[in-house]
Amino acid sequence: MLTRRRMKQTDPLIRLTAEAERLREEAKLLPPGVARDEMLRKARQAETGSQMSEWLRSPGLQPPD
């Protein structure tokens, strides 16, 4: 039977924030166009994911009764 190796994820907030920053820096080097727009869209997605993850982990969020 094969066993699956599990990797412990680093903090997703830090990882997603770093990814968004990296994508924005890369986009600055590209000329205006489709590729740049796509990279900025991915940066916004990573940033939004980071914000949502932070919100979901917040202590003020209560489970439904």
Image (cartoon, rainbow, N blue to C red):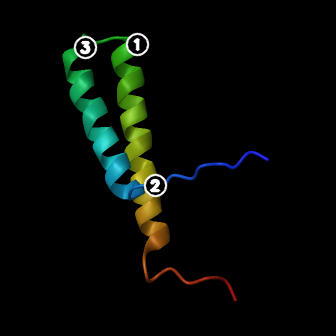
* Secondary structure of residue under mark 2: loop
Closer to the chain start, of discs 2 and 3, is 2
C-alpha separation, residue under disc 2 versus residue under disc 1: 32 Å
Q: Which mark is residue 26?
A: none
Give percent across and percent down for residue 64.
Answer: 67, 83
Mark 2 and mark 1 residues within 8 Å of each other at the beta carbon: no
Give percent across and percent down for residue 38.
Answer: 42, 22
Instruction: Determine the residue positioned at 42% across, 32% down.
Output: 42
Single out the residue that lies furthest toward the bottom.
Answer: 65
* Secondary structure of residue under mark 3: loop
- The residue closer to the viewer here, 17 or 51, is 17
Label 2 packing within 10 angstroms: few (<14), some (14-19), many (20+):
few
50 vs 21: above or below: below
**Labels in figure, total:** 3
Instruction: Determine the residue positioned at 46% across, 55% down.
Output: 9
Closer to the chain start, of discs 2 and 1, is 2
